């Protein structure tokens, strides 16, 4: 039985399909991390917006002590005028106001409610925990055999 023209087209079509599948798989691997990062950023933004909206419906609370000072620093960050970090009882400030700038969006969106500081703290801590779990799963999947060998060697000793 000879090879006809139709057989040639069918075989090249299969090769083209396999090549396309390989290219799609490579594209999928390259796009997964940015898509996960974008989805995580959207989830964080939605969580901040939702908690801020819910806090707007509550009556305002009066801050005292350290919470009042944190609220004042966050207010300055929301206005864009904060240039130093948290205070110290030894009459100096910690470097960098980045924490207060993380609090600022939720604080401003909530109508400057003190409770937003707690909600924003929870959201950022859960975000950091999720990032840590993603990093650990990535490292584990890349080095699974070496980690399992280390664990088995460590536990096999008397």
Image: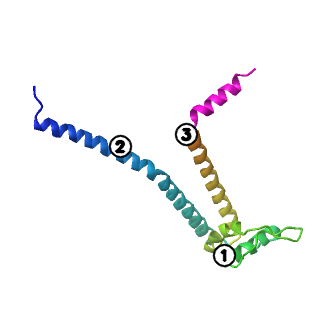
Residue at 46% x, 51% y: name it. Answer: 32
Please provide percent x and percent y for residue 141: 55, 39
Find disc 3 in the rendering and name its residue.
142
Q: State the SS at label 3.
A: helix
Say which quadrant the C terminus sits in.
top right
For the residue pair 99 and 146, the one nearer the viewer reads as 146
If you read the primary sequence from the N terminus, does the residue marked by circle 2 or circle 3 appear first?
2
Of 20 and 47, the residue lying toward us: 20
* Cα distance between the residues tagged 3 and 1: 41 Å
Q: Give the range drawn in magenta.
A: 142-158
> Is residue 107 rendered magenta in the image?
no
* Residue 8 image position (x, y, % from top left): 16, 37
Which numbered circle lies on residue 22? 2
**Left or right side of 88 for 36:** left
Mark 3 in CB contact with mark 1 (< 8 angstroms): no
Q: What element carries label 2?
A: helix
Q: Which residue is pictured at 73% across the width and 68% down the height?
A: 96
- Do the residues bearing badges 2 and 3 touch, measured as CB atoms within 8 Å? no
Residue lying at 58% horizontally and 37% vertically, measured from the top left: 143
Q: Nearer the viewer, residue 102 or 113?
A: 102
3D distance between C-alphas at marks 2 and 1: 48 Å
Q: Earlier in the sequence, mark 2 or mark 1?
A: 2
Asked which quadrant contains residue 49, the reply is: bottom right
Which residue is label 1 attached to? 78
Q: How crowded is mark 3: few (under 14 residues within 10 Å), some or many (20 or more)?
A: few
Q: Nearer the viewer, mark 3 or mark 1?
A: 3
Report x, y in % for residue 155: 70, 25
At horizontal 66% and vertical 30% (from top left) the residue drawn is: 150
Q: Which colour scheme is used?
A: rainbow
Vertical side of 138 occupied by 108: above or below: below
Camera-nearest residue between 6 and 32: 6
């Amino acid at each position: 039985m000879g090879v006809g023209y139709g057989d040639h087209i069918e075989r090249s079509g299969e090769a083209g399909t396999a090549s396309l599948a390989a290219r799609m798989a490579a594209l999928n691997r390259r796009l997964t991390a940015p898509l996960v990062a974008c989805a995580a950023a959207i989830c964080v933004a939605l969580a901040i917006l939702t908690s801020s909206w819910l806090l707007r419906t509550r009556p305002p609370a009066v801050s005292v002590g350290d919470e009042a000072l944190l609220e004042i620093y966050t207010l300055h960050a929301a206005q864009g005028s904060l240039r130093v970090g948290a205070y110290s009882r030894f009459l100096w400030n910690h470097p960098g106001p980045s924490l207060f700038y993380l609090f600022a969006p939720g604080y401003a969106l909530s109508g400057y409610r003190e409770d937003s500081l707690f909600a924003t703290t929870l959201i950022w801590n859960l975000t950091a925990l999720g990032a840590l779990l993603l990093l650990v799963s990535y490292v584990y999947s890349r080095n699974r055999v070496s980690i399992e060998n280390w664990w088995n060697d460590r536990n096999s000793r008397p």
